[in-house]
Amino acid sequence: AIDDFVDNYGEGFEKRYLNNTAEFGNRLTTLKDDSGDILPRLWLKRKHYDVIYIDGAHDYDTVKRDLEYCWHMLRPGGVLLMDDYNDTLRDNPFKFGVDQAVHEFFRDRTDFTILSDVDKDYQFYVRKNG
């Protein structure tokens, strides 16, 4: 997991995260950093993962960058999950860039299988074929 745990609203994100993930012990690695800093370093180290869950910044450029790096590090057969998908289903005063980035990234690809209900789910998840 990568998170800088910036808590602008005093909601205790880091403490809640640690409590929620304690049962996973050493099966989960947590890196306290910004994805823009850590993903390129992980990619250069040729790290690969079975499951990647992206719930980072919601602007188009960041989502697209995170998708690019994470897709290259996802093992064939692995699952990639994107949070805050389907912006059109919610009454949101500001529009995220998640949907646009996801649609553009996967539009011309053939190396994946969609696992989520793209008409109803607020998360988008796919299996990487291979």
Image: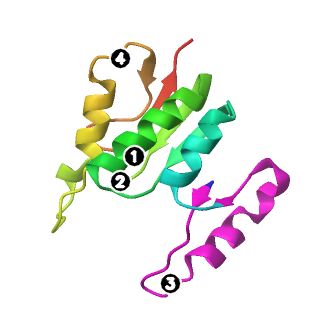
Q: Earlier in the sequence, mark 2 or mark 4?
A: 2
The amino acid type found where label 1 is placed reads Gln
Front of the two marks 1 and 4: 4
Is 44 in the magenta?
Answer: no
Pointers 2 and 1 in contact (C-beta within 8 Å): yes
Is 14 in the magenta?
Answer: yes
Q: Is residue 122 visible?
A: no
- Per the image, label 4 sits on a secondary structure element best described as loop
Residue marked by disc 2? 84
**Which portion, as a residue range, is magenta?**
2-31
Q: Earlier in the sequence, mark 3 or mark 2?
A: 3
Residue marked by disc 3? 11
- Per the image, label 3 sits on a secondary structure element best described as loop
Which numbered tag is attached to residue 109?
Answer: 4
Residue at x 28%, y 39% (from the top left corner): 101
Residue at x 35%, y 35% (from the top left corner): 117
The amino acid type found where label 4 is placed reads Arg
Q: Which residue extends farthest bottom?
A: 10
Foreground of the two, 34 or 107 = 34
